[in-house]
Image (tube, rainbow, N blue to C red):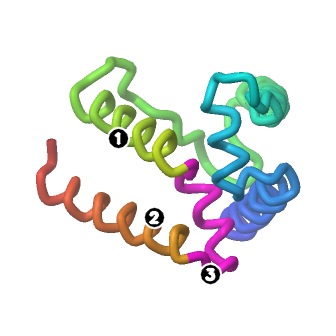
Amino acid sequence: MPVIIAFIAGLLMSAGIAYSQMIDPNKVLGFLTLNTNWDPSLLLVMAAALVVYSSGYWLFISKGKPVFAENFSLPGKKALDKPLLIGALLFGAGWGLVGYCPGPALAAVSSGSHGTLAFIAAMVAGWFVSRKLAI
């Protein structure tokens, strides 16, 4: 059942990202570029996602355990460490340079855009490199 729920959640996220046009890097870059053509629509998408996530979190965390699992898988680390900071820096740089982050890039892969496919290839290569370096 957890796999089915994860699949449905992924489908919902992909549909939401596509519907809000966040799979279009120009839309995202319009939000990240603070000039007279600034597009605040991504801010609304993020706010809506925060409301949905927060509501679900507070509703289910008080139950003590998830509906279809033995326990919650919450991160144990709370400190800002070197791998987290480097990862955040690379994530932000990639997002700001090309207008993609992993979720929307995967949702946009069906477009067949060379830019999207190149981003995903770079993302996968970066994942393998980071595993080898184990920063």
Amino acid at circle 2: Phe
User: Is residue 104 covered in magenta?
Assistant: yes
Q: Position of residue 73 (x, y in %)?
A: 53, 41
Query: Which label sits on residue 126?
Result: none
User: Is residue 126 covered in magenta?
Assistant: no
Q: Quadrant of the C terminus?
A: top left
- Magenta range: 99-113
Gap in angstroms between the C-alphas marked 1 and 3: 24 Å
Residue occupied by mark 1: 90
Disc nearer the start of the sequence (3/2) = 3
Q: Is residue 5 above or below residue 64?
A: below
What secondary structure is marked by label 2? helix
Residue occupied by mark 2: 119
Amino acid at circle 3: Gly
In this view, the mark in front (1 or 3) = 3
Residue occupied by mark 3: 112
The residue drawn where x is 74% and y is 28% is 38
Q: Nearer the viewer, residue 16 or 59?
A: 16
Disc nearer the start of the sequence (1/2) = 1
Q: In which quarter of the view is residue 126 placed?
A: bottom left
Q: In which quarter of the view is residue 35 placed?
A: top right
Q: Position of residue 53 (x, y in %)?
A: 76, 33
CB of mark 1 within 8 Å of CB of mark 3? Answer: no
Amino acid at circle 1: Leu
The residue drawn where x is 80% and y is 59% is 18
What secondary structure is marked by label 3? loop
Q: In which quarter of the view is residue 76 placed?
A: top left
